[in-house]
């Protein structure tokens, strides 16, 4: 299923799919595999604290709850992607978040990637998020 | 009636202690919502406290939060039973629910994010004696057909302790 979403929309969108969030086992692995600066780990600790999410060094990403994994993945991307007019497609991401965290995540997207456009996958295909258009 | 006694339920491998302040009593025809912030332990409580307690006496269907592994099981089960296997995850789950024959308890852990209102309606939730749901989506009135509505609110107290507060939603 994840592959199908990526195959269908991967050319036109940066896809963030709750079924296919990470490549690495830990956040440190993920940062290494993405070729990012090690300092990003400290940034992530600070970013996640804003969601009352305490990152633990070396902890397996799969051991965080589904919503927490979505938050970590999105914050990681926000800190790595260039601020260009990208189209970011969220697949079942916002639905895993509490209303407070959903709002906080959209606020962080707007602050870190103001040029990006956010979309959410619906049964009718990708729909722009009105709050971030 | 399903009852879970008041007390502290420790899930040591997850490092969480669930403190149920008062007994949770669910008569047949109950819809139970589990709510709380991300990471409060709702899915952990489901899998390590509630489901083991329910399974002692009841038949249940569980659609987990992360369907990656479960969808393979569902696909295989349907195929072994000689049924067509729909490509769409929600349709697949719907076929599995219809095939199972269990109509006592259905547990949906954020499963509603995958389904349209029509697909959810096709699951015929009122056909079950109990429904347990975890969801961050607007509640709507999808369980209004049930005689009783309850909510357990999860609140992380800091450290390992999670406070569980039981609220009756309806009838008031």
Image (cartoon, grey):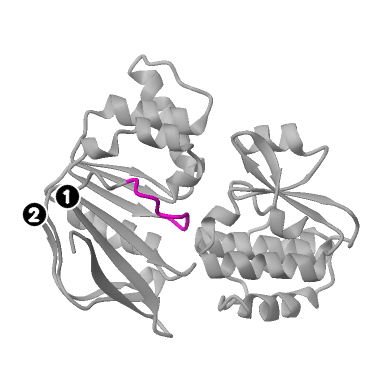
Q: Nearer the viewer, mark 2 or mark 1?
A: 1
Name the residue rendered at 77%, 64% in the picture: A78
Residue B134 visible, this orientation:
yes
Residue B73 visible, this orientation:
no
Q: Categorize mark 1 by other alpha carbons within 10 Å: few (<14), some (14-19), many (20+).
A: some
Labels 2 and 1 touching (C-beta < 8 A): no
Rendered-image quadrant of the N terminus of chain B: bottom left
Horizontally, residue B96 falls left or right of residue A41, namely left
Magenta run includes residue B137: yes
Residue segment shown in magenta: B135-142
For the residues labelled 2 and 1, the Cα–Cα distance comes to: 13 Å
Q: Categorize mark 2 by other alpha carbons within 10 Å: few (<14), some (14-19), many (20+).
A: few
Foreground pick, A122 / A82: A122
Magenta run includes residue A133: no
Rendered-image quadrant of the C terminus of chain B: bottom left
**Which numbered circle lies on residue B1?**
2
**Relative to A45, is B153 above or below?**
above
Residue A103: x, y in percent?
A: 62, 67
Chain letter for mark 1, please. Answer: B
**Relative to A11, is B35 above or below?**
below
Name the residue rendered at 53%, 56% in the picture: A96
User: Which structural element holds mark 1?
Assistant: loop
Chain letter for mark 2, please. Answer: B
Dot 1 corresponds to which residue?
B147
Q: Residue lying furthest front in this view? A: B172
User: Which structural element holds mark 2?
Assistant: loop
Name the residue rendered at 27%, 56% in the picture: B32
């Amino acid at each position: 299923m994840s592959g199908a979403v990526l195959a269908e929309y991967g050319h036109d969108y940066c896809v963030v799919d709750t079924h296919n969030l990470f490549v690495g086992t830990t956040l440190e692995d993920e940062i290494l595999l993405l070729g990012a600066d090690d300092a990003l780990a400290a940034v992530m600790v600070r970013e996640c604290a804003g969601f009352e999410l305490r990152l633990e060094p070396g902890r397996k990403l799969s051991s965080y709850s589904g919503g927490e994994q979505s938050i970590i993945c999105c914050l990681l991307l926000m800190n790595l992607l260039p601020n260009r007019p990208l189209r970011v497609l969220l697949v079942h991401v916002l639905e895993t978040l509490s209303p407070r965290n959903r709002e906080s995540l959209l606020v962080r997207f707007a602050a870190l990637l103001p040029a990006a456009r956010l979309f959410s996958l619906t049964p009718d295909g990708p729909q722009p998020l009105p709050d971030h258009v | 009636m399903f009852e879970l006694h008041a007390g502290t339920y420790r899930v040591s491998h997850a490092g969480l202690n669930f403190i149920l302040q008062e007994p949770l009593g669910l008569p047949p025809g109950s819809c139970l919502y589990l709510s709380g912030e991300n990471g409060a332990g709702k899915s952990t409580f489901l899998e390590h406290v509630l489901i083991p307690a329910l399974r002692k006496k009841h038949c249940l269907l569980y659609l987990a939060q992360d369907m990656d592994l479960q969808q393979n099981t569902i696909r295989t089960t349907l195929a072994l039973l000689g049924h067509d296997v729909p490509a769409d995850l929600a349709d697949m789950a719907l076929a599995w629910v219809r095939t199972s024959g269990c109509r006592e308890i259905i547990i949906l852990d954020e499963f509603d994010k995958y389904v349209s209102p029509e697909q959810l309606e096709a699951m015929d939730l009122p056909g079950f004696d109990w429904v347990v749901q975890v969801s961050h989506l607007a509640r709507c009135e999808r369980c209004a057909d049930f005689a009783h509505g309850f909510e357990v609110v999860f609140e992380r107290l800091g450290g390992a302790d999670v406070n569980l507060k039981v609220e009756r939603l309806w009838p008031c």
